[in-house]
Each structure stands twice: as C-alpha cells, then as structure tokens.
Image (tube, grey):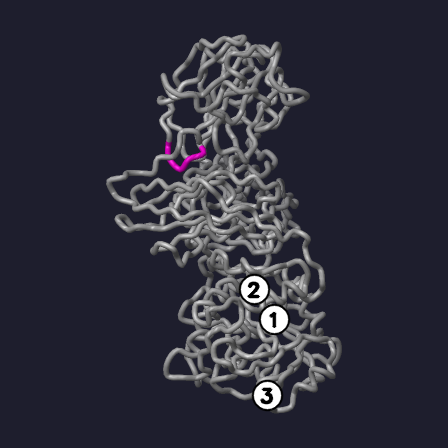
Amino acid sequence: MMMFRLPAFLWTALTAAVLVAAAFGQAPPGYYASVDGTDGATLRATLHPVIDDHSRFPYTSGSADTWDILELADEDPSLSSSILDVYRNASYAKEGGGNSFYNREHSWPKSYGFPSDGTGNYPYTDCHALFLCDSGYNSSRSNKPFGVCSSSCAEKVTDPNGGQGGGTGTYPGNSNWTSGSLSSGTWEVWSGRRGDVARALFYMDVRYDGGTHGITGVSEPDLILTDDVALIASSNTGSNEAVGYMGLLAVLRQWHLDDPVDAKEQQRNEQVYAYQGNRNPFVDHPEWVACIFAGSCGADNTPPIAPTGVSTLPGDSSVFLDWTDNTESDLAGYRVYRSAFAGGPYSALQGGLQTPSFFLDPTVINDSTYYYVVTAEDSSGNESLESSEVNATPTASAGGVTVDQRAIFISEYVEGSSSNKAIEIYNATHETVDLADFELRKYVNGSTSASSATLSGLLPPYGAAVFTNGSSGAAGLLADLINRGVPYTTLSLLTFNGDDAIALCEVGGEVLDVIGEIGLDPGTAWGSGSITTQNDTLRRKASIIWGDTDGSVAFDPAGEFDGFPEDDFSGLGAHAGPLHLQVNCATTTHSGGVHATLGATGSPIVGTNDLSLTAASLPATGTTAYIFNARFAPGQAATSVPNPAPAGGPAASGDICIAGGTFGRHVFGGDIYIGTGGTFTITVDLDDIPHPDGLGGYGVAAVAGETWYWQCWYRDQSAGVGASNFTEAIAVTLQ
C-alpha cells in the first residue's frame, strides 16, 4: 500500500504523539486478587507480597541475563532488530553487552542503597527499573535525582522516532534537561518517557521494603521515595544500605499523570514479567499511585461477580463464546482468557475491555483444544474471579461459526404521520445473513393471529436493512431515504398503528424480536412520554445485542429504545450497535451540491481483517483525495475542529471530525485522482496501518478495544479553485 504525506496545513492541525504498535498487556486473572485497596497503607501491605520474591537474573552472564531481557523489553516497536533507548529516544541495532552505543541505566541509581552487584542483590538487576540508554546520556544523568530543572539547565535533545521526540532549544520541548551533579543535581526526563520512569520508581518503593527474600533468605534494602534531598544524599555511601532514598516524589507523581501508560510500557511489563515472574503493578493499575503515594484511594474495592453461563461454539478456525450478562451497575466490561491446557495458565485475548457478553476468537488452529475463562471488571478497575472453565475444539468440518439468530433484531421503528411507517433490521453478527429466512408479522389490535411478509436481500455483518410502506402517503419517508442514498424495500404489510405488535420471526418459525405485547390491545400505544409506539420514532440502544423473543410479557419501549419525534427518519440505515461502524459527524456540501460520504464494509473483528472504506459522491472535478485516521484508547472520543485553510490559500469547508486524540494520527492510502467517478475504495490492513512520519514510516497494529476514526479529505477544484473539504467521519470500536 502506498504511503503519503498529508498536506502540510492539515498535518499541522493533526500532529500529536504516536502510540507505538504493541499489544496491551493484562495481568493473569487473579494475579491481584489478594490486594486490598481500602487505604494506602493496606494497599501497600497487600500489594508487596504479590510482587515480592521475584527470580533474579545475573547482570552479565553467558546465559540469560539482564542484556537479554532488556533487549526484548526495550525493543524498537518499528524495528525488532533494534532497541529504543529511554532518554535520547534513539534507535540502535541490538548489540548485546559490551557495545559502545548504549548501556543499562539504573533509574533508581544503584549508588542509593545497592551499589554492589552479586547473587544476593536483587534491586541491582531488577529489570523493571533498568532501561537501555544511550551511553553518553547515561553518563550525563549519573545518579542525579529526578526533578524539574529550573535554572542553569543543559539540554539533552531527543531523536525524532515513532512520531515522538525531536526538536531543540525551547524548554521543555521534547528534550531532557539537567543541572548540577550527584544528589544536588537534577535530571528532568523528556515528556515521552517520564511516566515510564516514575512508575519504575514507584515499583521499587513497594517491591523493596526491607526484610529478606522469601525464597533465598537474602537481605533486601528498604527503598523509599522522598522529596528530602538530604535523605537522598545520605544514601550515597558507597555501601549497600538497609534504607535507601530517591526522588523527588512530588515530581514523579506529576510525571505519572503527565505521561499515562501506553502500549509500549504495557509490552515492557509483559517481557520483564515473563522472566522475573513479577509485574509492575503501577503499569497494570495506574490508579494505585494516588492511593499509595498521595492517600487518595477510591471507595470501591468490590469486584463484580464472576461471569456465569459461559458456553462455546467451535467453528472452522474459530471459536465463539457467549455468557450471561453481569448485572452490576458499574460494570465496565469483560476480559476473555485462553490457555492450551486445562486449568491454565491463561493469556488475555484482547487488549481492552470486551463490552458485549460474547466474543469471537479467530486465532485458533483446527483440531486443537482450547480452554477459556471470562472475568468481569467494573469502572474502578476491580476484576472478578474467573468464570468456570470451558473448552472447544475447532474443526474444518464445523464450517463457519453460526451466531444465535437473536442477534438479528429490530433496530428502528418509525410510526409516523400518514403512511410514513418503517422497520429497520440489524445484523449484529459476523456473518452475512439471507433475509429470505426471516419474516415480519403484524398483530393488529391485540390479535393473536398475524399477517406476515417474507423479507428479501442479503444483510452484511453489522449492517442494517430498511423496510418501508410504499404507498403514496409515505412520500416524505421515501424522499428522505432517496436523498440520503439509503437502500430500502417496500412492504405493503407495514400499515401498522401504535397499538399493533410487530414481530421479526423465522419464516414459519420462532419469534426473534417483538415490539409490543402479542395478544394485548394497549388502547393507543405502548410506552409513555416521548418513548411510545404511536407518533414516535424508536431507535434501539447501542448496547442491545439480542432481540426480545418473548412477545407475551409486558412491553415498555423505554427499556431498550430511545425516543425521537414523529417523522424523524434520520437514523434509518445507520444503526450503531456495539460492533458497528458508526457515523461520527457530517460536513458541508461541495460544489456538486451534495455531501461526500465515507462508508465501510466488512467486520470490526481484528482477527478477520476484512475492513474496507469507500469514499463516494466526491466532486467530479479531477481532484486529489486522502483517507486519514486516528486511534483512540478505550473511553476516549474524537473532537471536531474547523478545516484549516492554508495561508493565502482558498477557503476551506467542513470540519476535521477526528481531532483530539493523544495517540497520534496514522495515515494511509495515496494520491487519488477522482476523475468523473467520484468514488474510491481502500482496504484497511488492521495489522499494519502505515504512518508516514518522514523518518522511515512504520506500521501500527490495531488492538481490540480501541476506537479508530476514519475520514476522507479532498480537493474541490470547481472553477479552478482548489478548496478543501471533508467527508463525514466513521468510527469503529474494534473487537
């Protein structure tokens, strides 16, 4: 795929730090189960045993040692044969021990408590606090405490790498800054890694609390973070100390907030954990920093109950999992773990939280048995115990995974004026559905007998189909759909009123979803206020993933639907379920008098990697167009800013609808000559989304749980004027 550079004016508006490609790590289920966060002292006391007594690897050895661990932990995400150092942000080819380019930086200087190497000195070789570092920068930092460099500061610049670093001369910029020497000096870490360093020191403070190693019996120091420079200086004796001090604590706390945990730091935690057998808890749970070091502890320490009803459905090179919804009001989502062995150990299958109570695992090999557990997590980060273990053996003979037909449901209901009646059907599965297998039934005025109409057409994964009344009285509805380019099918059956139940069913079979209560005449409508089945539009909430199969129970649309005014057709054809490609915002019309659009086909499942984007209705004026994108972490959302016109250039139209991310922008595609067609399609490789940073662009891998936004920028050269504009934007939360 051709990589390209955005126009300079647009790139300036979108520039931000880039999150490197790495899979987010997750602690094994139950790793922190014994931790009690009631208050800071209790959290510290219960956390220490979890991370204590790790395996020690030698500092330098002919076998596995700290060099081996660190060259994996600090690997350059854009080049696996290189490392990325902590202070200079320079990429160096892996050389191993004894090279002249980089060495090992003790973020907690060894002179403050543990200057001597040896088989019993665990903090000396603890890779959670060791970083590969440019040799000159390591020497310059020496053993200076971390702090804010306020006067007589020397600049230690960073290399531009991975969309971060680079630039000189302006404090603080993207540089490290230093002054003084030894404990009276200061080393201010550049903005891209200061959080990493801070969390390494928080780990050291909790991991080492004096006493002895529980397995070897070796004495260990008590390492304490402080703002007292005199105490820090007192630790620098040249001998191993029972108590060692380092800081500055207040600065480190701020750096932790300024530079949140990212994917690279998560991956580093995983690599060190694979060797030492212990994790940095402040990477897994950043909120614990405030509790232990600032006394600000959340009141909620109660995890959700373990998920129940977990089942598996094996397919061809895939396994589908389903489980019962948890009912906690503060539920944030679920985590799915897999093992090749009964009883574990288990590894997390997705980076972020899994919101729906189902999961497709497309990364399995046929004829192998896999074991799964599921946990639930609340908004405070409390994770439940594991569910009961289930297993599945995918086989080629199983064919594709068949998803429960309840995932085909009514996503929108329009009971408008005159004959403006419509039903939207949504496919919340990963398979194309033949609508000929389904029918709509209408139960009039409380009748238990129905008239029906068989549907038609193919409904793609995560797609919506619109069915309308086709009479002349539906002119307003049909005109709206035609104007917006929404495909629809007319059904004479759709002449319902607010007291008529409407059901989606298998042809001649079971009810899959129903609006209303079959056999009951409610008088005029079900519901109340603005959420009723009469003279209203009802749109299914995005959180709904199953249809309501029981038409014999009391029906209140407010439980699963949002209400909109009569004759509001704007949502038809664009339902956004939890796995759906969603319209984010619209922009202005171009010289052709219409909105350019951006659509998508395929699925948002990372493992299937079949997502395509199509820009359409572009101005047929011989122009240039780009598709660009932005990645957002779970819980983040894009913002909208005006399209900036170049200095002295033509006016710009529309909005940048995908601004505001902290993880950077990654561009792909190429210069596209639109010509008279006004349409082009790009297939998205979710495993390798290029980023042209001008410094040897690299591929960024999408991670489940992230939300990605896409938007098309184009020139509109009507009358020779190269004004720019945007399509609408779309978003997808990857699963």
**Image location (x, y in percent) of residue 416:** 59, 16
Q: Which residue is mark 2?
A: 281
**Of the residues shown, which amino acid type is indicated by label 1?**
Val
Q: Is 178 or 104 nearer to us in this picture?
A: 104
Residue wearing tag 1:
206
- Crowding at mark 3 (Cα within 10 Å: few <14, some 14-19, many 20+): many
Whichever of labels 3 and 2 marks the residue nearer the N terminus, that label is 3
Marks 1 and 3 close (CB-CB < 8 Å): no
Which numbered tag is attached to residue 240? Answer: 3
Q: Residue at x 57, y 21 (%)?
A: 555
Helix, strand or loop at mark 3: loop
Task: Find the magenta span and give its range.
Answer: 428-432
In space, the residues marked 3 and 2 are separated at their CA atoms by 26 Å
Disc number for residue 232: none
Answer whether residue 368 is visible to the viewer in this image.
yes
Q: Secondary structure at mark 1?
A: helix
Question: Which residue is nearer to you in this view: 413 or 659?
Answer: 413
Is disc 1 in contact with disc 2, using a CB cutoff of under 8 Å?
yes
Tell me the quarter of the picture where residue 285 sits: bottom right
* Overall secondary structure of the magenta section: loop
State how far apart marks 1 and 2 are (Cα): 10 Å
Mark 1 surroundings: few (<14), some (14-19) or many (≥20) residues within 10 A: many
Helix, strand or loop at label 2? It is helix
Residue at 71% in and 63% down: 295
Residue 509 placement, left or right of 245: left
Mark pair 1, 3: CA separation = 18 Å
